[in-house]
Image (tube, rainbow, N blue to C red):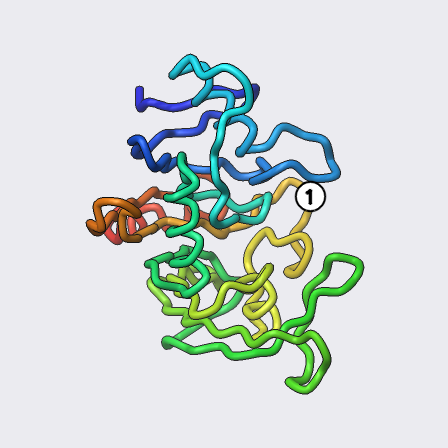
Amino acid sequence: MAEGVHAGKFFIPVLYEDNHLLVVVKPPNLPTQADRSGDDDLLCILKGYIGKKYQKPGNVYLGLVHRLDRPVGGAMVFARTSKAAARLSKDFSAHAQDRRYLAVLQGRLEAERTLEDWLLKGADGMVRVVSAGMSGAKRAILTTRPLAVRGGRTLVEVKLQTGRSHQIRVQHAHAGLPLWGDARYGGGRPGEQIALWAYRLGFEHPTRHEPMLFTAPPPEAGAWLDFDQEIKEFI
């Protein structure tokens, strides 16, 4: 069995660990950090893992340098030192890392497209596409590339050029290609798991300055099952 952390119904695989970094696979439906739900969250679980493994008393430091939406899973990196956190945060803010996603779209995408919109997050937490001149709106750009089409759905690889809240979900829905299982933006039904997964994470090690690259396949369940063979060949 792969090394990892058991926390209630969740198992969190550990992909890499050293004195400066902790790279894990976030399970779907686990909050990245504490929220109003009061549910267990990934950051606190990993702090507990570090404290127990290395017998660190008191509050354990673990820096959060990027996030995934609660229903979304995939590869994430955490910083184990403030120095690593500062350098990783700078790189992530400048998009100087390689983050790629797999998604299953409702509809057929026949060719690669670049989506560019202006997004605004409302007081209700919903993100909407608005006009470029609207106060508070932020420019959002991504590239979506079809990998396979089956049964009116498309498996795509998504690369972000900006990192906006709910960006992948909102921009695809606005383009008429909502993500399968997205209850908030795509009309997903109860019991459906959103088909969005952070499968690839590349960045420069904050102290050794060496390239680091990690991949994690999505779970063999839900909409991913329709593209099982393509995913295995792709990752």
Residue at the location (50% across, 63% down)? 163
> Residue beneath label 1, please?
190
Q: Residue at x 50, y 25 (%)?
A: 60
* Along the line of sight, the residue nearer the viewer: 162 or 199: 162
Residue 128 visible at all: yes
- Residue 28 lies left or right of residue 146; in this view the side is right
* Residue at screen point 73% across, 35% down: 37
Q: Residues within 10 Å of mark 1 (few under 14, many from 20)?
A: few
Where 58 sits versus 206, above or below? above
In screen coordinates, is 192 left or right of 145? right
Residue closer to the observer: 103 or 2: 2
Q: Is residue 120 above or below residue 76?
A: below
Question: Seen in the image, is 130 located left or right of residue 103?
Answer: right
Q: Quadrant of the N terminus?
A: top left
Query: What residue lies at 64% left-to-right and 60% top-to-bottom?
Result: 186
The front one of 191 and 43 is: 43
- Image location (x, y in percent) of residue 176: 58, 73
- Can you tell which quarter of the image residue 177 is in? bottom right
Residue 182 left/right relative to 159:
right
Identify the image quadrant of residue 144: bottom left
**Residue 171 location, x and y as percent?**
56, 70
Image x and y of residue 161, in percent: 43, 70
* Amino acid type indicated by mark 1: Pro
Instruction: Tell which residue pokes out farthest to the bottom in this image.
Output: 133
Q: State the SS at label 1.
A: loop
Residue 79 x/y as whole percent: 41, 39
